Image: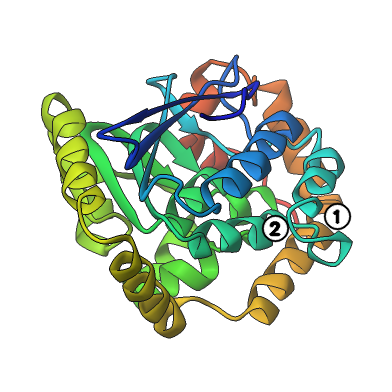
Amino acid sequence: MTAPYETISVSTRLDGNVLFATFNAPPINLIGPEVVRDLVGLLEEVSRPASARVVVFDSADLDFFFPHVDLTKVSEYTAEAAKAGGPGDASLGMLFRKLSEIPAVTVAKLRGRARGAGSEFALACDMRFASRENAVLGQPEVGIGTPPGAGAIQHLTRLMGRGRALEAVLTSADFDAELAERYGWINRAVPDAELDEFVAGIAARIGDFPRDALIVAKAAINAISLPTPADVRADAAMFQQLVRGEATQQRTTELFERGFQTRGRTELNLGDALGDLKAVD
């Protein structure tokens, strides 16, 4: 039995071995305090003994998986994230690290835009499968005025290598699913009509395997591949410092004037919008 959540719909299938969690935070699935509060609760739930062996995350909004954080509520969502690990770990980066470490296999099923912390949420999952026609990934932070702060630098460098990680982070460009697959950002790009069945099949297969073997194998791979807590905290601190800086404030002001954080051209084509902003020192 799962707890009620404001922004996440949950259901269990396949003898309780697979949990499907669908984000639904209108109008465009921004990561704000309500989403973070629900995610903290859900991670606690699926960390309990005898909980689901596999968790599949997707979005009810076909245009937006998670476009990014709500930049008007940074302090509020950070305070919610602190409830997962205490005031010393008040960051999405450390919350997403907890996501990477839970004793369940996590799968992100991506349709729509997964940018910024939305991409970083997906990167913290164990696997990522995306709609070939309808998924877009991006790290827009540098174009806004701050480096990514919730895991992108750590994960993308490990997945892509230095050159491609620099391209993804420094250009703040949008990547379609085919290019994201080629670069290693996602596991696979799957035709949209086949994505649901494909992910359900993988989840069912893994969910039938012995729990202890899944947990031990995941922990061993995490020990090799995850960044240290110190690295995650350092990235979060730099983001939280620069997101309040003058350059970021100037650029976000211009973005809001163009319809930022609303369902319109700016959010749908954020990579292009960032390239059109006025240059600042």
- Which image quarter: residue 36? top right
State yes or no: discs 1 and 2 in contact (Cβ < 8 Å): yes
In the depicted structure, whether residue 125 falls above or below residue 200? below
Q: Is residue 97 left or right of residue 10?
A: right
> Mark 1: few, some, or many residues within 10 Å (few <14, many ≥20)?
few
Mark 2 residue type: Thr
In the depicted structure, whether residue 250 falls above or below residue 10? below
Viewer-proximal residue, 15 or 215? Answer: 15
What percent of the width, then of the height, locates residue 137?
A: 40, 44
Q: Residue at x 14, y 40 (%)?
A: 201
What residue is disc 2 on?
146
Q: Is residue 262 visible?
A: yes
Q: Residue at x 67, y 62 (%)?
A: 94
Q: At numbered mark 1, what does the secondary structure look like: helix, strand or loop?
A: loop
- Which image quarter: residue 41? top right
> Mark 2: few, some, or many residues within 10 Å (few <14, many ≥20)?
some
In the depicted structure, whether residue 127 falls above or below residue 3? below
Disc number placed over residue 245 in the picture, else none: 1
Q: How many marks?
A: 2
**Label 1 to label 2: alpha-carbon separation:** 9 Å
Disc number placed over residue 39 in the picture, else none: none
